[in-house]
Image (tube, grey):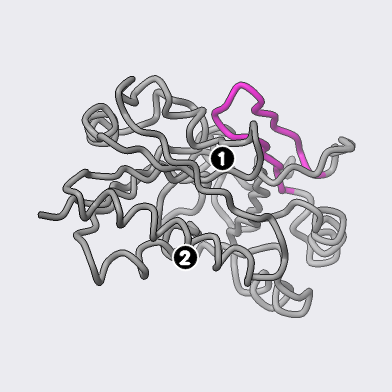
Amino acid sequence: MSGTLYLVGVGPGDPELLTLKAARILGAAPVVAYPTTGADCAFALDIARDHISPAAIRLPVAIPMTVERGPAQAAYGIAADGVLRHLREGRDVAYLCEGDPLFYGSAMYLVTRVAPHAPVSVVPGVTSLTAAAAAIARPLAARNESLKILPAPLPDETLRAELAAAPAAAIIKIGRHFDRIRALLGATGHAANAVVVEHATSSRQRITRLADFAHDERPYFSTILCYSGAETWGSQERGE
């Protein structure tokens, strides 16, 4: 008998944004695994802890935060072995995923290792992208507009070409790339109507127009939403 691995999206930060299905699975799972980047840094666990059964076995998965992919890949190999031990003994495992498991989620590396050996079920979650849009009460895009989701580590020439063809864009994975991205958006004309959303929906949420951004922090959990289309919210924010 094999248990099932549940990849549970716990949303962007607000514990009330867990879905009913996520809460039900977490309340029943005998094993709960979660990524951690340090002794006291387990954001997904912080979001979901009130929904986890007190009797559940907790299985931290240490993920190195390095540019090189090798150490993280090795960590997921070790994590898969630990998860599979529980699954082979008939225990379900819920793996906590910030946001949505399959929206730029690293949980995919766990799936490729576990799926050949045991059932895997994905529980979608609220993404950081939709959370950021909700925080500023502005649509991501409308009508026939295209929306580009662009990781900040991409080269400037790639970002410039993508932005030129998109009336609406979201820049993610900003972190140490913030100053470079701000300069690029200024050069492409997207800066005037860009908003920085940090830690969307959490107690640390902060919303700042890109033009006014002067914080020293360059947090990982931030998104820049840009709009240069013709809809009314764009013209209003540009002062037209």
Q: Residue at x 60, y 56 (%)?
A: 170
Q: Callout 1, which amino acid?
A: Ala
Residue carrying label 1 = 132
Question: For residue 88, which quarter of the picture?
Answer: bottom left
Identify the magenta region.
193-210
Residue 122 lies, in percent from the top left, at 28, 53
Q: Secondary structure at mark 1?
A: helix
Amino acid type for the residue under numbered disc 2? Gly
Q: Is residue 31 above or below residue 73?
A: above
Which numbered disc, 2 or 1, marks the residue closer to the eye? 2
- 240 vs 81, left or right, is right
Residue sitting at x 26%, y 27%: 27
User: Neighbour class for label 1 at 10 Å: few (<14), some, many (≥20)?
Assistant: many
**Residue 161 sits in which quadrant?**
bottom right
Disc 2 from disc 1: Cα separation: 32 Å
- Identify the residue shown where x is 65% and y is 57%: 171
User: What is the quadrant of the N terminus in the image?
Assistant: bottom left
Relative to 191, is 55 above or below?
above
Choose between 87 and 5: the one closer to the eye: 87
- Residue, disc 2: 77
> Quarter holding the C terminus?
top right
Residue 103 visible somewhere in the drawing: no
Q: At x 65% / y 55%, what residue is drawn?
A: 64
